[in-house]
Image: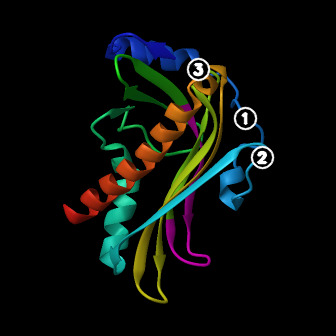
């Protein structure tokens, strides 16, 4: 949804209520778990090393659970106190050059496990009012073999009609978000 001015909190809450019963806007919800994107979807995969050791992993896991990867100047997560659990919905509000976009997403799955390494995270998928179609996984991994901790973003997407008209701008925003999200996670771990 594109807007000419920043929406109020009440507007955003009501908007999210309209999305409660909406289906995901893409095929195969959960496909990011196996990194198997649907055909004709673009794949983006970004990783950054956050540090070493179990305490860094614990800090990074807490940052994931608190949505710290969205602590970005031009992005607002509505709402960061939303528990990360299957079915929870959020909206990503982004400031652009002269307008705003409000993009609803729903958590597809939460990720906790130790095989083959300890990891924590989740994936969310787009709902019909989102400017794109697709799914994005945010996770942290602790590789015991070298004690390294990594933040990983894996996404597949395809633009909706409105985003297709501004395809290059949309792709630049996706790249910018990934870079800013990695920087936000580095800050979150460094400040703990």
Image quarter hosting the C terminus: bottom left
Residue projecting furthest to the front: 168
**What's the residue at 66%, 25% (across, down)?**
160
Query: Where is residue 189, by image quadrant?
Result: bottom left
For residue 19, the mark is: 3
**What's the residue at 56%, 75% (across, down)?**
114
| Residue 20 percent coordinates (x, y) | 59, 22
User: Between disc 2 and disc 1, whose residue precedes?
Assistant: 1
User: What SS does tag 1 mark?
Assistant: loop
Q: Badge 2 local density, few (<14 within 10 Å), some, or many (20+)?
A: some
Q: Nearer the viewer, mark 2 or mark 3?
A: 2
Q: CA distance from mark 2 to mark 3?
A: 23 Å
For the residues labelled 2 and 3, say whether their Cβ atoms are less than 8 Å apart.
Answer: no
Q: Which residue is mark 1?
A: 26
| Residue 124 percent coordinates (x, y) | 57, 42
Residue projecting furthest to the bottom: 145
Q: Where is 55 relative to 19, above or below?
A: below
User: What SS does tag 2 mark?
Assistant: loop
Residue 114 part of the magenta segment = yes
């Amino acid at each position: 949804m594109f807007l000419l001015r920043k929406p109020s909190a009440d507007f955003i809450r009501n908007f999210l209520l309209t999305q409660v019963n909406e289906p995901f806007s893409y095929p195969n919800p959960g496909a990011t778990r196996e990194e198997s994107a649907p055909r004709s979807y673009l794949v983006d995969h970004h990783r950054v090393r956050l540090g070493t050791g179990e305490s860094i992993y614990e800090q990074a896991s807490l940052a994931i659970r608190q949505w710290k990867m969205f602590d970005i100047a031009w992005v607002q997560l509505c709402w960061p106190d939303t528990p990360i659990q299957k079915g929870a919905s959020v909206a990503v509000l982004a400031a652009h050059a002269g307008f705003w976009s409000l993009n609803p997403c729903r958590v597809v799955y939460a990720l906790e496990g130790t095989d083959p390494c300890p990891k924590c995270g989740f994936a969310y998928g787009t709902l019909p009012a989102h400017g794109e179609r697709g799914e994005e996984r945010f996770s942290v991994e602790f590789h015991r073999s070298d004690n390294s901790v990594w933040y990983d973003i894996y996404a597949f997407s395809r633009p909706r009609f409105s985003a297709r008209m501004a395809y290059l701008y949309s792709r630049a925003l996706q790249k910018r978000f990934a870079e800013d999200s990695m920087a936000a996670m580095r800050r979150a771990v460094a400040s703990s």
